[in-house]
């Protein structure tokens, strides 16, 4: 694929490239093992770091690069798409990671907004985008929204474990909210009722809290399950995955 190995772009080339998305390919099998985005000479930095920082043995990406070099071969660098803005590059990167599959790469996480706009079958997409927004009034019970991704759910083993811990919060305040909504892609996927012990400090992560609970009673669940959270909980730039209900 490459006719000549280079370690950097010239200044006039980096200016024209703007932001780009790249792939690192293992010449031993022709497979892409890493997808990234950047500008300038970002595409070459992984090779330099892998050869310089030998302590990061737990980094599968660096391990792969070292194995390629030890075999007397060179990592193949491919620019998948260039001439983009930063935001455009983030979306292309996310799409490429999803297409190849995170399990087939040394990347540690999916790209930006993968949970919101990533791969879904058409039935799921129709259901989620057409979901009605749940209503709130003076009789609505107090709740906490916890936003979690499919990636975290897979890591923890199930949605309940991904939702229940471990959060930085004021336990006195949190214990005033009897219900917890587990939300993905803006849709309420589960409604839990906090148990009698309330929010307690996590045994292994000091300063963070968790709860023991169960699925909420049907009368509450039917009001929220499968429905979209109101826009006030979905404001752009609202980074926190943990939100208290507001009047």
Image (tube, rainbow, N blue to C red):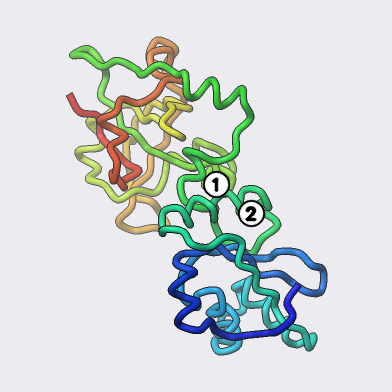
Dot 2, how many residues are within 10 Å of its Cα: few (below 14), some (14-19), or many (20+)? some
167 relative position to 39: left or right: left
**Picture quarter containing residue 220?**
top left
Q: CA distance from mark 2 to mark 1?
A: 10 Å
175 relative position to 66: left or right: left
Q: Is residue 22 visible?
A: yes
Quadrant, the C terminus = top left
106 relative position to 192: left or right: right
**Picture quarter containing residue 24?**
bottom right
Q: Secondary structure at mark 2?
A: helix
Expressed as whole percent of the image width and height from the top left, the position of residue 171 reads: 25, 42
Judge whether 171 appears above or below 11 on screen: above
Which residue is located at x 52 percent, y 36 percent?
Answer: 159
Residue, disc 2: 102
Closest to the observer, 141 or 171: 141
Quadrant, the N terminus = bottom right
Expressed as whole percent of the image width and height from the top left, the position of residue 22 reads: 59, 65
Judge whether 210 appears above or below 34 on screen: above
Eye-nearest disc, 2 or 1: 2
Which residue is located at x 41 percent, y 54 percent?
Answer: 87
**Picture quarter containing residue 49?**
bottom right
Q: Is residue 183 visible?
A: no
Which residue is located at x 60 percent, y 81 percent?
Answer: 47
Circle 2/circle 1 CB separation < 8 Å? yes
Q: Secondary structure at mark 1?
A: helix
Indicate which disc, 2 or 1, sits on the residue closer to the N terminus.
2
Which residue is located at x 55 percent, y 41 percent?
Answer: 118
Closest to the observer, 22 or 106: 22
Residue, disc 1: 151
Q: Residue furthest top?
A: 219
């Amino acid at each position: 694929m490459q006719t000549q190995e280079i370690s950097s772009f010239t200044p006039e080339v980096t200016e024209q490239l703007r932001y780009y998305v790249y792939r690192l390919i293992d010449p031993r099998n022709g497979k892409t093992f890493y997808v990234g985005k950047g500008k300038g000479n970002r595409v070459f930095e992984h090779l330099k770091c892998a050869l310089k920082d030998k302590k990061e043995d737990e980094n599968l990406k660096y391990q792969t690069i070292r194995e390629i070099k030890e075999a007397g071969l060179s990592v193949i660098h491919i620019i998948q798409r260039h001439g983009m803005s930063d935001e455009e590059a983030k979306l292309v990167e996310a799409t490429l990671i999803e297409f190849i599959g995170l399990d087939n790469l040394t990347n540690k996480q999916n790209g930006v907004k993968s949970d919101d706009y990533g791969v879904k079958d058409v039935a799921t997409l129709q259901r989620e985008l057409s979901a009605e927004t749940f209503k709130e009034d003076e009789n609505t019970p107090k709740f906490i929204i916890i936003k979690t991704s499919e990636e975290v759910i897979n890591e923890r083993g199930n949605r309940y474990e991904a939702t229940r811990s471990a959060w930085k919060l004021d336990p006195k305040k949190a214990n005033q909210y009897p219900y917890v909504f587990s939300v993905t892609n803006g849709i309420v996927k589960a409604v839990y009722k906090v148990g009698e012990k309330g929010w307690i400090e996590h045994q292994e992560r000091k300063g963070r809290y968790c709860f023991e609970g169960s699925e909420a009673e049907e009368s509450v669940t039917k009001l929220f399950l499968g429905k979209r959270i109101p826009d006030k909980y979905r404001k752009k730039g609202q980074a926190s995955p943990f939100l208290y209900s507001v009047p």
